[in-house]
Structures are given as structure tokens and as C-alpha cells.
Image (spheres, helix red, strand yellow):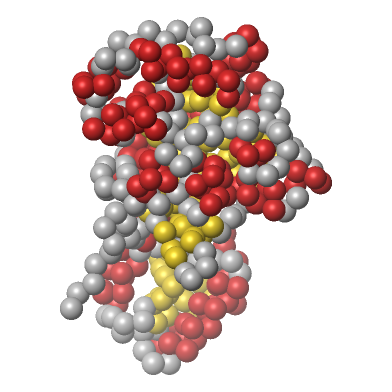
């Protein structure tokens, strides 16, 4: 019997992991520059955390959550990061001790949906949340941060789209406007959108089916449903982005698929990703903290998909230089114990080092060192052992020299 991975998941193999590490390392540097602190929430949460925060008619809740049931409770694998972080913010009393917080996170999320390009059942997010302010300057910082993460990871050719949904009252007015605009057009909508007409009409604006997109493109929504305060907020956000020279397009039909979003929403779209073209997205959720049992306070966040970042950069076609690895080859039974000691001393000195454990010939061991992209090879045989020396070969230049064992560490560190 052969075992295979669960559909919609993938193995991230060692030769790929280096690209993931590069993205994660870059992200941490950018977050540090913006003074965000890392938070790590459990992968498993009580299902009510998401049922309550995302909306009972959200597609994630209706169709996409991985549920785990026992005799008393129902848990789920987290489908997104924001609600879990708000839960942690409240449970750990940040709202009482230090209400303004800037968090970031990296990790896997889970959604039970049909796997396709850039969309898996286990996928990975890099995200950030600012909780404790309704200032439009926060909107600008969050969008600037996401833009910086994309640029620092070498992503080009993306488009930033922004919109405002307005406050809770404005969203209700938008729902009524949509009901009026879509009156008599339901037969042209897809099956899912015909259900959304009754349960979550805003999601029709985000449908990827061509007939629905055509109907939506003909809607005349304007901004009459928005109050003056929300219009002023959005105007300041746009001014802030322009001050930072961040290019954007206002997309009047842009909505996010979760009920908690209010006011500013945004997406970074990339043509390389096909129908699912968002490499990252986010927005404000000024009522979520209160709805989850905390005070009324402003908040905003975003998430970038790591798999989509990799697709957008085509990074895995790039050549990665080898690490400063030192590879030791011991020739003969007497040399092997001494090689183990040298290997240990190199590692204790902070030098990446490895050796042959397969009893390969010298030629085979050299081939292995080359496959590992080793920078230096150390060859220790009976002759070198007798002279208390070791042969050092530079794999880049091809030069080699015999050096004393007593200053090996110093010589190797100088070259690495």
C-alpha cells in the first residue's frame, strides 16, 4: 500500500524550503522596520470564533471550514488569521492593559475548497493587524507595509485596488442599493449568486463567474450610500497613499468576502495568478473587536499568500547560491575518528559542516560535495594525519593547499 498526501496539500521539499525561508526572513525584517511584533495563535480554534466573526453566510463558514467535533465542542482548523488574533487580543487583556497593538504572523491556514492554481486546502499567510485606532493613517501604514513586503520580495507588475465599504450604516444602504440595481437581473446570475441575493448580496460583487462579472460591471453604485465621515476618511487614505507615491486604482465594486470588513478594503492583484489573481488583500474591521466581546475600537489588517508570492515572482526558477558549507572527506579508518572531531569543532565554531556517511570513494565524495554546493572541501588521509595537516580545496576556484590542523578553524572561518 502506498500513501499519498491529502488532496489540496503539498510537500515543501528541502530544495524549495530555501525560497520560503528567504520570504519569511525578508518579512521579519520589514515588520521590524514598521515596529510590529510577532504573535502565534493556535492552528485549532473553537468554531464559534469564526462563525461569529466571519458571518454565518460567508462561504468560508458555509462550505470551507475543516471541522473537528468531540462530545462537547466543535473546533476547526483556522481558515484565516484575523479573528484568531482578535480572540487572543481580548483573552490576554490587551484591550485593558495596552489597547494599541501592532501584530504580525506567519503560518498555515486551512479551507476545504476545490484545489486550483494558487489556492490550496492548506496554504500559508504572512499578515499583520493594527488594533486600537480608527485613524486613516493606520490604513495608509497597513497598505504601505503590504506594498513594501511585495517589493522587498521582488514582486513586480502588481496592481493595488482600493475601495471603501463605509461604516455599518453605509453597508446597509449599499445592500438596499444593490437590491434595487439587481432587481430583474437574477436570472442572469450564477446559481451561487442567486443564493447570495437572499443571504449575502455583497458577495455578488466579488463573483468570478463571467456572466455575474458582466452584470456587476454595469451597476451604477456611485458613493451616495456613503456618509460624509466615511467619505472624508477615504479621502485621507488616498491622500496618504499619494504622499508615499503608492499607485492605486479605486475599484467601486471591490468588496472582501468576510462580513467584518468596514470602510477601507484593498487587494493587490497580479496577472500571473489567473482567475484567483489576488496576491494579498485586507481592510478595516472597526466593529469586530466589539462584536467579539471587547470595546468599540478601530482595527485594520491584511494577509499575503506565500504560495501566491512564489507564483508571482517565479522565484523557484532562480538559482540559489550554496551556503558556506565545509565538507570533510576522511580517507582510511584512522582518519575517520579525527574527521569527526574536526567536524564537531567546526560546528561549535559556527561553521556549517558535513561529511560522508556512505563510505564513498574520493571521487564519489567529491561529487557529493559538489551536489551540496559546498564552498570548501577538507580531505584527511593517513599522510595528512601523520603530518598533522589537512588538504583544503576551494570548490569555486579549484585551488587547494595543505594547512596545519592547529589553525584549521581560523583558516576556514577566514574563507567562509
Tell me the quarter of the picture where residue 323 sits: bottom left
Residue 256 spot, x, y in % from top left: 45, 30
Looking at the image, which is closer to me, 292 or 302? 292
**209 shown above or below 326:** above
- Residue drawn at (50%, 47%) of the image: 51
Looking at the image, which is closer to me, 333 or 275? 275
What count of labels does the image hold?
Answer: 0
- Residue drawn at (29%, 54%) of the image: 8
Residue 24 spot, x, y in % from top left: 50, 48
**237 shown above or below 195:** above
Say whether residue 140 is left or right of residue 3: right
Residue 250 spot, x, y in % from top left: 45, 14
Q: Residue furthest bottom?
A: 333
Q: Residue furthest right?
A: 97
Looking at the image, which is closer to me, 205 or 277? 205
Tell me the quarter of the picture where residue 176 sits: top left
- Residue drawn at (67%, 31%) of the image: 298
> Does residue 276 appear anywhere in the picture?
yes
Residue 377 spot, x, y in % from top left: 41, 68
- Residue drawn at (55%, 18%) of the image: 170
> Does residue 387 appear anywhere in the picture?
no
Amino acid at each position: 500500500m502506498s500513501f499519498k498526501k491529502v488532496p489540496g496539500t503539498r510537500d515543501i521539499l528541502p530544495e524549495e524550503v530555501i525560497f520560503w525561508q528567504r520570504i519569511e526572513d525578508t518579512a521579519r525584517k520589514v515588520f521590524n522596520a514598521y515596529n510590529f511584533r510577532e504573535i502565534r495563535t493556535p492552528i485549532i480554534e473553537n468554531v464559534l470564533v469564526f462563525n461569529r466573526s466571519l458571518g454565518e453566510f460567508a462561504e468560508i463558514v458555509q462550505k470551507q471550514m475543516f471541522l473537528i467535533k468531540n462530545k462537547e465542542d466543535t473546533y476547526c482548523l483556522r481558515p484565516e488569521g484575523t479573528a484568531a488574533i482578535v480572540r487572543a487580543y481580548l483573552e490576554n487583556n490587551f484591550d485593558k492593559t495596552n489597547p494599541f497593538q501592532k501584530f504580525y504572523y506567519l503560518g498555515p491556514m486551512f479551507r476545504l475548497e476545490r484545489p486550483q492554481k494558487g489556492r490550496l486546502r492548506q496554504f500559508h499567510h504572512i499578515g499583520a493587524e493594527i488594533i486600537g485606532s480608527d485613524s486613516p493613517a493606520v490604513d495608509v501604514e497597513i497598505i504601505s507595509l503590504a506594498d513594501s513586503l511585495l517589493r522587498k520580495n521582488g514582486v513586480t507588475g502588481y496592481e493595488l485596488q482600493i475601495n471603501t465599504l463605509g461604516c455599518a450604516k453605509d453597508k446597509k444602504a449599499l445592500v438596499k442599493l444593490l437590491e434595487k440595481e439587481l432587481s430583474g437581473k437574477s436570472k442572469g446570475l450564477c446559481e451561487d449568486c442567486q443564493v447570495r441575493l437572499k443571504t449575502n448580496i455583497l458577495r455578488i460583487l466579488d463573483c468570478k463567474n463571467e456572466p455575474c462579472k458582466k452584470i456587476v460591471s454595469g451597476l451604477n453604485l456611485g458613493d451616495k450610500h456613503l456618509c460624509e465621515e466615511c467619505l472624508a476618511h477615504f479621502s485621507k487614505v488616498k491622500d496618504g497613499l499619494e504622499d508615499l507615491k503608492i499607485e492605486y486604482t479605486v475599484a467601486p465594486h471591490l468588496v472582501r468576502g468576510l462580513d467584518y470588513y468596514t470602510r477601507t478594503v484593498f487587494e493587490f492583484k497580479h496577472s500571473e495568478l489567473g482567475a484567483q489573481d489576488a496576491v494579498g488583500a485586507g481592510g478595516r474591521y472597526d466593529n469586530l473587536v466589539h462584536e467579539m466581546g471587547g470595546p468599540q475600537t478601530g482595527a485594520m489588517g491584511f494577509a499575503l499568500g506565500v504560495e501566491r508570492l512564489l507564483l508571482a515572482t517565479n522565484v523557484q526558477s532562480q538559482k540559489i547560491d550554496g551556503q558556506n558549507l565545509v565538507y570533510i572527506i576522511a580517507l582510511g579508518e584512522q582518519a575517520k575518528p579525527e574527521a569527526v572531531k574536526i567536524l564537531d569543532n567546526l560546528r561549535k565554531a559556527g561553521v556549517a559542516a558535513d561529511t560522508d556517511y556512505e563510505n564513498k570513494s574520493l571521487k564519489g565524495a567529491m561529487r557529493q560535495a559538489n551536489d551540496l554546493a559546498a564552498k570548501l572541501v577538507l580531505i584527511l588521509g593517513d599522510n595528512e594525519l601523520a603530518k598533522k595537516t589537512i588538504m583544503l580545496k576551494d570548490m569555486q576556484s579549484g585551488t587547494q593547499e595543505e594547512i596545519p590542523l592547529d589553525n584549521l578553524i581560523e583558516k576556514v572561518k577566514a574563507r567562509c
